[in-house]
Amino acid sequence: MAGKTNYIERVLETVKKRNPGETEFHQAVSEVFESLKFVIEKNPEFEQAAILERIVEPERQIIFRVPWQDDKGKIHVNRGFRIQFSSAIGPYKGGIRFHPSVYIGIIKFLGFEQIFKNSLTGLMMGGAKGGSDFDPKGKSDPEIMRFCQSFMNELCRHIGADTDVPAGDIGVGGREIGYMFGQWKKLTSLFNGVLTGKGLDFGGSLARTEATGYGCVYFCEEMLKDKKESFNGKTVVVSGSGNVAIYAHEKATELGAKVVAMSDSNGYIYDKHGIDLDTVKQLKEVERKRIKEYVKEHKSAKYTEGSFDIWNVECDVALPCATQNELDEKAAKTLVKNGCIAVAEGANMPCTPEAVKVFLENKIAFGPGKAANAGGVATSGLEMAQDSQRLVWSFEEVDKKLHQIMINIYKSAKEAAKEYGTPGNLVNGANIAGFTKVARAMMAQGLV
Ligand code: NDP
Ligand code: 2IT
């Protein structure tokens, strides 16, 4: 046992040394490795085949210059990334993030998580992530278009419907995917499923927009069922007010819950009568304004500056749907004290490791991001299937498949946790179930 633990520690040390300063990547690797001690112990062949050393090193990392011109004619240069982490179980697949905080450590953490998340969906997708330190806030549509075109000018050399299929993430939604797809087509003459999250008129899938938020709630519903509970009558806090947050709110509300708080990076809104989703959609999806504007229209709502204080709001269920490390140990303790019974991560790695520990110790049902938010990429997989078939499935058909995938993910994580001796720990379960499939595929394909 000690020897096996040493193997994990040794590889983790190498990761830290070889990737200095990439703190989010270190955090993601150490969280996954923490769960893998159970697997390495049972499967010594993984150490012999150096599976851990291989899986932490991306197959390919592309960093490129993205020059673009603003409306006044001034030239700007941003940095673009595409990290192709693993193609063991399918073409590289994962989103693109545009946010000023983006650097290689963020893209690597996201790409690493994506390997296991995509594996959990049961579909044929490898792991990748991309992005840029470009800040879309306050930019005009033509500026966004020129940036997306410049980004694609380089990205197009590295992607393809059967090699690497990007999609959206923070700061990249339908508008950006549309501009990138247009440029892809212009450059390659190919009309195919090279990007997912496309518009419904040109190869997009119904229910992809809703998928991550809906999927997160479907996953949480399964956790609640195991506690003989449901969303009906529950008070819910959803952080963020972007794509994932909006559709998590929509599905939770449909299942009878009341969402009382939402946020953006400046602050949060609270209304004990519930947050009106139509107003949030209008503000965020159409007008691209700040969440504080909400209280102008809804006098019973209160706006508080400082987004991370949202966790002080009392709730039964918490759905962190904004960004990494947005919920820390102190926030986790507050949630527990306030009687919260379930937390499902709509965002990637929103809870710090200390916060996760608090939830697990207090027997709060906890759904880790790579399981709970896998509905987005799963539905991207369904979009790829439709594009390949040149067919369009109905909303109900896609939603039904998504729902079943989320139930399956919950079952795999739960069963793996039990099989490896940590029943009820879905963090371990998801990491183990996601990893073992990829590791087996790597073993079968030889040293490549
Ligand atoms: P959006 O850009 O649509 O929304 C992001 C939301 O999070 C906004 O409300 C934004 O506020 C807030 N936010 C972003 N960065 C920060 C920050 N540093 N501090 C505080 N708040 C912040 O992105 P998505 O909804 O698509 O993504 C949200 C999360 O879900 C991310 O972690 C993403 O990786 C994850 N995810 C997304 C999937 C998808 O299909 N889109 C799939 C699976 C996971 P503001 O507008 O002020 O920046
Ligand atoms: O983090 C994620 O899973 C996403 N941003 C979605 C990726 C995708 O390819 O749909």
Image (tube, rainbow, N blue to C red):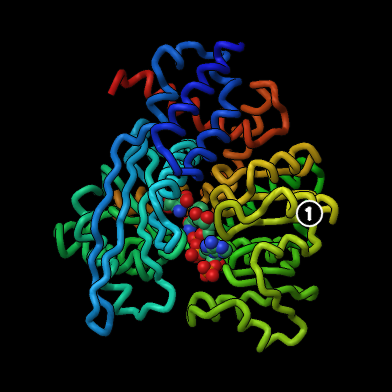
Residue depicted at 29% across the width and 49% down the height: 388
Residue type, mark 1 in image = Leu
- Asked whether residue 242 is in view, the answer is no
Q: Which residue is mark 1?
A: 335
Image quarter where the N terminus lies is top right
- Element carrying mark 1: helix
Q: Nearer the viewer, residue 368 or 206?
A: 368
Q: Residue at x 63, y 74 (%)?
A: 277
Whether residue 7 sits left or right of residue 352 in the image: it is left
218 versus 248 height, above or below: above
Counting from the top left corner in percent of width and height, residue 383 is at 38, 53
Picture coordinates of residue 71 (x, y %)?
Answer: 27, 83
| Corner quadrant of residue 276 | bottom right
Which residue appears at 57% of the width and 35% of the height?
31
| Front in this rendered view, residue 19 or 51 | 19
Q: Nearer the viewer, residue 298 or 62?
A: 62
Q: Is residue 367 above or below residue 432?
A: below
Write the residue at 39% across / 33% down: 18
Callout 1 environment at 10 Å: few (<14), some (14 to 19), or many (20+)? many
- The spot of residue 391 in percent (x, y) is 33, 56
**Which quadrant of the rendered structure holds the C terminus?**
top left
